[in-house]
Amino acid sequence: ATRLLKTSSEAGRATVLSEPTRSAVQDWYATVPPGTIPVVTGFIGEGPQGQITTVGRGGSDYSAACLAAALNARAVHRWTDTQGIFTSDPNRDPSAKRIVRISLDQANVLTSAGKFGMHPSAVEPLLPNRIPLHIRSTFEPEAPGTLLDPTPGVMEIAP
């Protein structure tokens, strides 16, 4: 990731720089043999002087979104310990409902405000190319999860 994610210099809260990252990712990806599934770590990057930086708590979500944006990916799949995003914490609120779909724009506002348990900037890189983000459960992979949908204004809550 340090060869790919080019960041500002603030360790622990660095910002991924879009254009240098896009260039590094596209150059690297062009060398990946067809049929190969590359695995890239998250959370870390390279600052302007070549120093290792970190992007903060939830940084792997942010890293994945930045890589997807650089490659104009069809989608991002985030695997986590919950069945998706809920209207409130289901561990504390028995009436919490799973959000089936929510627009990327709405999700970006909520994520930036510290909701959804992701890095505050995890959705932002997906906005320009309208890349969907599907949140799924590693414990229940067959569960439908939550789709952060590129369609503006969409919001669907499970019954």
Image: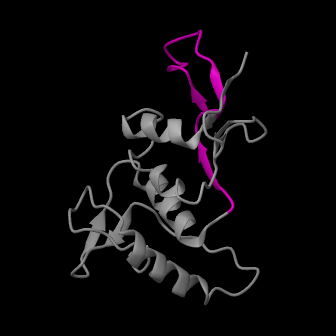
Look at the image and give the residue range highlighted in magenta.
74-101
Foreground pick, 2 / 121:
121
Q: Quadrant of the C terminus?
A: top right
Residue that appears at 48% across and 34% down = 116
Residue 115 x/y as whole percent: 43, 32
Q: Is residue 148 above or below residue 19?
A: above
- Residue 151 sits in which quadrant? top right
- Residue 2 sits in which quadrant? bottom left
Residue 21 x/y as whole percent: 42, 75
Q: Main secondary structure of the magenta part?
A: loop
In the image, taking residue 77 as reference, residue 125 lies left or right, namely: left
Residue 48 x/y as whole percent: 24, 78
Outermost residue toward the front in this view: 152
Residue that appears at 51% across and 19% down = 88
Outermost residue toward the bottom in this view: 31
Outermost residue toward the right in this view: 142
